[in-house]
Amino acid sequence: MDTPYGSEVVPVWERPEPRPRAAPVPLSRDLIATVAIRLADEHGLDGLSVRKLAKELGVGPMRLYDYVRGRSELLDLMVDVVYAPIAEAGRQSGWRETVLAVAQATRAAALEHEWFADLLGGRPHLGPHGLAVAEAMAAALSRAPAVRGIDDLQRALGALNAFLVGAVRREVTERRTVRATGTDEAAFQTGLGPYLSRMLETGRYPTVARLVIEGAHLDPAESFAHNLTTVVDGLAGGSTRRVRR
């Protein structure tokens, strides 16, 4: 395809909306993304397809291809809509406040749209709102006391993203498991109580025994906030040690 940039493919965010048709059902990318998000919220990503979306919108599937080239571009649009409030949360004055706000907003978005968690951790999301979130986080961490150059910044972003993606995915997975089994984590552990007691009584797992006996069932929101703060404070402090290559 010939474009102002040569023969490269123009991303969906840079392509103009198709010209409106004299059709019973008006379409736009915003409407398409909104309805697709609702379908994914209700049925998950496995329950979303261009054909199902077209049926929900009351149009033929081919008409949607005027707006998105396929499911991949559809997901790109949906993800960028979800990133919009996360980008707004990143408008803080201090670097630490920005990082905490964006991380909390990301968790909130994943709990509201569980399919969003499935799309975290892969290739970066490069829509306008996704880039705004990336800029907010990178700019914030670049002001952390221990970040002195681009290498430090890359490592700090990597550590923070590893925690964030892992924590969010784990929480979403637990919610799905509860729905699928009808048993929460506490009930699951209680059900295996006799077996676990026998294993712990062998004395081979003393630290696990302490966690089971003395540890409390932590509230997910409080646990996330505490662990996030620990990670961010660790990034702020940094380390004087460097890995020798």
Image (cartoon, rainbow, N blue to C red):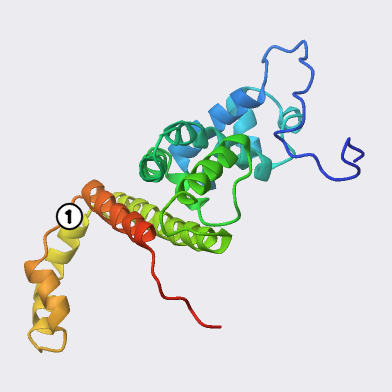
Q: Is residue 239 left or right of residue 23?
A: left
Where residue 104 appears, as percent x and y from the top left, is 35, 42
Element at badge 1? loop
Residue 34 vertical position relative to residue 108 in the rendered view, above or below: above
Q: Amino acid at mark 1?
A: Leu
Question: Toward the viewer: 239 or 223?
Answer: 239
Question: Toward the viewer: 213 or 58?
Answer: 213
Question: Toward the viewer: 182 or 238?
Answer: 238
Where residue 111 appears, as percent x and y from the top left, is 37, 42
Residue 56, image quadrant: top right
Where residue 212 appears, as percent x and y from the top left, is 12, 70
Q: Residue at x 9, y 75 (%)?
A: 194
Q: Is residue 8 left or right of residue 163?
A: right
Residue 25 vertical position relative to residue 199 in the rendered view, above or below: above
Q: Residue at x 67, y 22 (%)?
A: 28
- Is the residue marked by circle 1 packed among few (<14), some (14-19), or many (20+) residues within 10 Å? few
Q: Is residue 177 visible?
A: no
Residue 11, image quadrant: top right
Where residue 53 appears, as percent x and y from the top left, is 60, 32
Q: Is residue 47 left or right of residue 176?
A: right
Q: Quadrant of the N terminus?
A: top right
Q: Residue at x 11, y 82 (%)?
A: 200
Residue 149 vertical position relative to residue 65 in the rendered view, above or below: below
The residue singled out by tag 1 in the image is: 218
Q: Quadrant of the C terminus?
A: bottom right
